[in-house]
Image: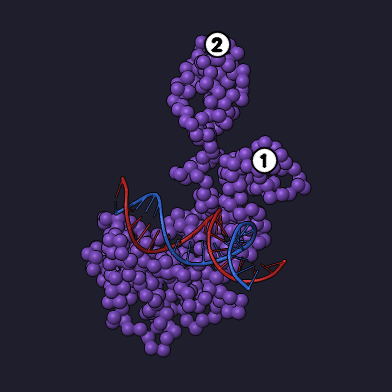
Chain colours: A purple, B red, C blue
Amino acid sequence: MKMLSVGGRLTLVKSVLGSMPIFYMSMFKAPAGILKSLESMRSHFLNGHDSASGKVIWLSWKKVITPRDKGGLGVASLFALNRGLMFKWVWRFLNQGSSLWARVIKAIHGIDGNIGRVPRDGYNSCWSNIVKEVKYLSEKGIDLMKYLCIRVGNGGKTSLWEDIWRVDGRLRDKFPRIYALESCKSITIGDKLAQPSLQFSFRRMPRGGVEQEQYELFVQEMQQIILTSLEDRWSWCLNGSGEYTVASVRSLIDDTLCMDYGQRTRWNEFVPIKVNTHVWKVMTNSLATRFNLSRRGIDIASISCGTCDQGVETVSHLFFRCDMAQQVRRLINRWWMVPDLVTESFEDWRIWVSNIRMGSKTKKMFEGVYYVAWWLLWMFRNKKLFEVKGPSKATFFDDVVSRSFYGVVVGAKSSSLGTTSLRIGT
DNA sequence: GCTGTCCAGGCTACAGAGAC
DNA sequence: GTCTCTGTAGCCTGGACAGC
């Protein structure tokens, strides 16, 4: 674990530790205690923590699993994965209604599988757990059923009045006076359109007033329907493809349940994950600076800056107010021919960068140079504090230029040419 | 009958190619 | 320049099949 960078650990947390429990979670509801335990293992791995080391946890797992749009690191939660995988059975149940397993569910739980209702007390099964979770999420404001809508094909399976096959809801709610005239309430779209006229199954002809108005609108809507030879099927409205994906539910759940930290995480694809993660730590004040160490009650000799030895070593000081950070800022701005401005915190810097007039890709590259500079500043500070032979300050800016130029600028240009971008070494 | 191998099916991330 | 698709890497289990 010590040989892996935080970027490597982040990738493994998402890809490997996040997919290991898929098999069990595909069918069973993971109990809260198990989820807590698994999340704790992932957190310890990402933090490079093992029980023997007693290393401090710097990355709050709640922030780590928060979507990037809300200021997190975008590692989806296992809770959301589990519920997304469970809901996939509802999707299959609706789309594979004639399969053997769906017929068994219908025989036990009813023709609609009891979805959306509360299962009987004391009766637990895989299916009843799924139904309960759909209900539970709905009460939490995540109504997954509303993202299911019917895509009409030949109209043979879809109830004209009762089913939701239009974005604006059921026809019976939209045209209540016409619905009242219908003698066959469960008629399918296909059967209705096969009749000699739309009034064929009405108790009587529509009269004037509201009834006539609703009837005319109803006729207009029905004229827009084009039936095909395909069977009616369910469509998933949360993504463009219409096909259910666990990822879409996963991001919906995390997006709804996770707290908003106010600042969107600025992820830059031109720099390695470890550098991006470092910038995220700068943004969320999750670095082991001397000030943060003392705040955690760890006994240290001094809390002054490890680079300049002037001022308290906070994140804002190290990367924005420290003499060395300011020199680097001036040199980068001169290199990129950008008017220099003193920024005292990450938030200041973020506002300043967003106001610079630059092409979107160029700005990303410019931000990437800063990201690399902050990462190198942190390496410089660590070498100065923990290595016998300190780093050379004289060559520091050359290092920033060469690594960011080859890593970010050349990398960005070569990626647009379809070749592998150069990566910044450790 | 046991054991080992391969594949399918569920997901993730990332890189590269190609289309628009 | 951006988006989408494809391929490859990883994790798990179960089932089919070949070899001993």
Chain containing the residue with disc 2: A
Q: Quadrant of residue A90?
A: top right
Front residue (pair A174, A353): A174
Chain containing the residue with disc 1: A
Badge 2: few (under 14), some or many (20 or more) residues near its Cα, within 10 Å? some
Is residue A123 in sight in this rendering?
A: yes
Front residue (pair A359, C17): C17
Q: Is residue A347 left or right of residue A399?
A: right
Q: Quadrant of residue A321?
A: bottom left
Say which residue appears at 56% left-offset and 66% top-offset.
A42
The Cα–Cα distance between marks 1 and 2, rounded to whole angstroms, is 40 Å
Pointer 1 residue: A103
In the rendered view, would you say A294 is above or below A246? below
Front residue (pair A267, A202): A202
Given the image, on which type of amino acid does mark 1 rest?
Arg
Residue C19 screen position, x and y as percent: 59, 70
Is residue A141 in sight in this rendering?
A: no
